[in-house]
Amino acid sequence: MKDTWLFVDSGHCAPSFNMALDEALLNWHSLGKIPPVLRFYGWEPAGISVGFFQKVDGQIDLEGARKYGIELVRRQTGGKAVLHDQELTYSVIVSEEHPAMPKSIKEAYLVLSKGLLEGYKELKIDAEFATPGSAGMKTGSAVCFEEPSWYELVIEGKKAAGSAQTRKSGVILQHGSIPLEIDEIKLFDLFLYPSERAKERARKAFGNRAVAINDVLPSAVSFEQAKAAFKKGFEQGLDIDLQPYELPPLLLEEVSILEKKYKSEDWNNLRERKEVHQP
């Protein structure tokens, strides 16, 4: 018999709400109030999320973000900065003790990313898992989509989806970005470079390292179409049934409280952070 997980379709929400809801769902799952969760969402307004460790000063162009109306938020998970704009975002919340979850962070990535792989198959896109041999050279860039990590999805060697994972209170939280389109001009206007020439060189090189869904399909896929494909993909890849879940008032109250943290400068602009689980 297949395992039943909750499916949360929260639509397009503010960056602070998106991060607060992921944390609240993790808390509820850790307390045994809800089973594992798959959540799909978008961002309104667009956001740039920075990794738990990542410095903002000297890396992120806050003035550029304001110019575009993009809000900055710090994730619980590590990794590099991600522009969340024309994309489908997913999050998975599941206990570390779940029988399908390996103890190794790297291997848990592989298990959970099977849902992404099957989602791309639903869209007739030939994607595969990144491995150290296929990931290419490390760039040292602050931009997430410049280089894939273990078991992230690549299309013809280009990074197609970025994910990050942490473990807290016995629960795995993995969330990630599935771009439908990438606005390279906007993206690189959000990062600081020593000169305009350096920025332009980085932007041109980026095209050889990252790809979006609508770059490889003959007809553009909408947010709703991508959501349907990846929902089916996660059901197949993880061998689960998804049950729609309406967020109860008590959970939304917790989200409202947590959202204050994700809106605060103290949280979003801290320069140094202690170790967090990353592969």
Image: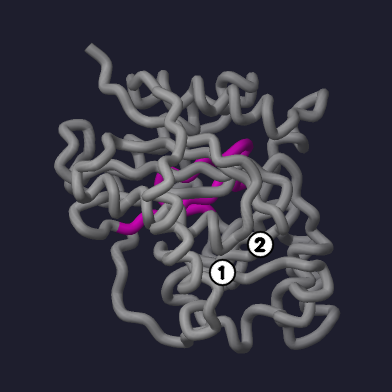
Question: In the figure, residue 108 lies in which quadrant?
Answer: top left
Q: CA distance from mark 2 to mark 1?
A: 7 Å
At mark 1, the secondary structure is strand
141 or 177: nearer the viewer: 177
Label 2: how many residues lie within 10 Å, few (<14), some (14-19) or many (20+)?
Answer: many
Residue 218 x %, y %: 81, 24
Work out which quarter of the rendered image holds the N terminus and state it.
top left
**What amino acid is at disc 2?**
Gly
Label 1: how many residues lie within 10 Å, few (<14), some (14-19) or many (20+)?
Answer: many
14 or 156: nearer the viewer: 14
Query: Which region of the structure is painted magenta?
Result: 148-166
Can the viewer see residue 204? yes
**What amino acid is at disc 1?**
Val
Circles 2 and 1: CB atoms closer than 8 Å: yes
At mark 2, the secondary structure is strand
The residue wearing badge 2 is 47
- At x 41%, y 22%, the residue is 235
How many labels, in total?
2
Horizontal relation, residue 131 to residue 205: left or right: left
